[in-house]
Image (cartoon, helix red, strand yellow):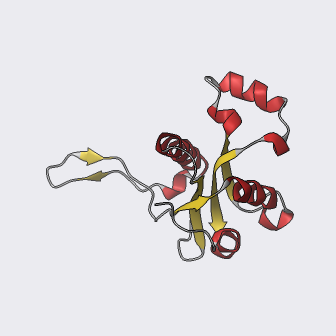
Amino acid sequence: MDVQNEKCVLILDGSLPPGVIANTAAIMGITLGKRMPETVGPDVADRTGHEHAGIIEFPVPILKGDREYMKTIREKLYAPEFAGLTVVDFSDLAQSCRTYDEFTEKMKNAQETDLRYLGIAICGAKKKVNKLTGSLPLLR
């Protein structure tokens, strides 16, 4: 990933309880790590020689959205203009499932319009990411 010309952000529904926000961010982060393994740096050793797992090599701002914005931005991300972006979403449907099999079965019968997005991660061309998210505040 070219950190000069590319960007990665997480957008979270700021109205959610802190535990759900943390869980949503963790799940999307793990999925991004799988989709973009080249962004994770090598393991490092501290002064005493203890190893620490590599972390992502660039900042990932956590932005605050609301229910309507999440729906709108997810809809925009289906447009051909944004096809080159890496997108990970996490919905209320996914959050309600106890197993991946349950999630895949429920998703087969779900209408996209019925999903409530708890979080959306977007990575790719900085201009496109900024066009979608430039007006959002940081989640605090």
- Residue 63: percent from left, percent from top: 55, 62
Of 8 and 62, the residue lying toward us: 62
Of 124 and 102, the residue lying toward us: 102
- Residue 108: percent from left, percent from top: 82, 30
Report the residue at 65% width, 56% height from top.
66
Does residue 53 lie above or below 125 as drawn?
above
| Quadrant hosting residue 87 | bottom right
Does residue 124 lie above or below 119 as drawn?
below
- Residue 77: percent from left, percent from top: 77, 59
Q: How many marks?
A: 0
- Residue 41: percent from left, percent from top: 42, 56
| Quadrant hosting residue 96 | top right
Quadrant where the image shows the N terminus: bottom right
Report the residue at 50% width, 62% height from top.
60
Report the residue at 34% width, 50% height from top.
43
Does residue 36 lie above or below 131 as drawn?
above
Report the residue at 57% width, 60% height from top.
64
Does residue 107 lie above or below 53 as drawn?
above
Of 49 and 111, the residue lying toward us: 111
